[in-house]
Amino acid sequence: MLKGKTALVTGSTSGIGLGIAEKLAAQGANVILNGFGEVDAPKAVVEAAGKAFGTKVGYHGADMSKPAEIEALMAYAQAEFGGVDILVNNAGIQHVAQIEDFPVEKWDAIIAINLSSAFHTTRLAVPGMRAKNWGRIINLASAHGLVASAGKSAYVAAKHGLVGLTKSVALETATTGVTVNAICPGWVLTPLVQKQIDAKAEREGVSPEAAQRDLLGEKQPSLQFVTPAQLGDLAVFLCSPGADNVRGAAWNVDGGWVAQ
Ligand code: NAD
């Protein structure tokens, strides 16, 4: 379905981004990976997923908090892949602290990586998408793009901002073949959440298993983690013709979190 398209997935060396990259490759898309840490293993996973299509998998290590590096990433996509057809803004970090203790540099980093990076990739990708009259922009927001939790002021502000950015750009492109939507996951068991489970276990003097049960019980009625594969399946749907008129949506995949 996506043969001939190129997907850039930011923050795709682990977790949700890797799961989405895998699903897009399995539909035949070429994929540009980005993110920190080990690259060969995630690259091999995505290559294997797209093997039947001879999927081309690239990598660029731009730090998504730095606009100049984002510009270099987009230039790489243009030079090596002829541009970006599917942009998945996924890179993100978390920091939990009460507002009066929130480190200023953590606030700045969360806003830069979780929100401003999507502004930069989007402003640079939209002209090429308009020219082809086809494009998909998928922003990984969060249930925290729709509702708040205490201790997560920067994250909640960034994710609400990302949902707002999604709606605004969806309106600007509404008469074109470019669609812009957000996916709003609940808890997904990735390194980002494992850190919060470990911190909770230590703070409350309970086992990691008990901390995990409590974490789900507090917010997620299904009591099950959402999986990167489920989010990848939704991303694939958003790239399909069936989703041509899904525009500006903030689609929750959260085990019932925001229904409460
Ligand atoms: P993760 O920690 O597993 O992956 C984050 C990815 O972003 C990694 O590849 C990391 O290298 C990359 N990254 C971090 N800082 C970067 C930077 N400055 N430049 C480039 N890459 C950078 O986390 P995840 O849980 O897979 O999160 C992915 C996205 O999904 C984030 O935007 C997160 O907010 C969102 N999300 C996660 C959950 C969850 O429960 N895990 C829920 C809702 C939304």
Image (spheres, rainbow, N blue to C red):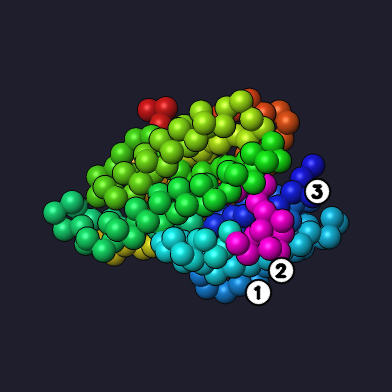
The x and y percentages for residue 102 are: 20, 57
Q: Secondary structure at mark 2?
A: helix
Q: Is 214 on the left-hand or right-hand side of 142? A: left
Q: Secondary structure at mark 1?
A: helix
Which residue is depicted at the point 79% across and 42% down? 1
Mark with earlier residue (3, 1): 3
* Quadrant location of the C terminus in the rendered image: top left
Tag 2 near tag 1, CB within 8 Å: yes
User: Which kind of residue does numbered mark 3 sit on?
Assistant: Lys
User: Which kind of residue does numbered mark 1 sit on?
Assistant: Asp
Question: Observer-nearest residue: 3 or 195?
Answer: 3
User: Which kind of residue does numbered mark 2 sit on?
Assistant: Ala
Query: Is 70 above or below relative to 20?
Result: below
Q: Residues within 10 Å of mark 3 (few under 14, many from 20)?
A: some
Question: Observer-nearest residue: 246 or 212?
Answer: 246
Look at mark 3 in the image and give the residue it sits on.
3
Does residue 104 show up?
Answer: yes
Q: CA distance from mark 2 to mark 1?
A: 6 Å
Which residue is depicted at the point 58% across and 48% down? 125
Mark with earlier residue (2, 3): 3
Q: Which mark is residue 160?
A: none
Which residue is depicted at the point 52% across and 61% down? 71
Look at mark 1 in the image and give the residue it sits on.
40
Q: Is 232 on the left-hand or right-hand side of 215? A: right
Look at mark 2 in the image and give the residue it sits on.
44
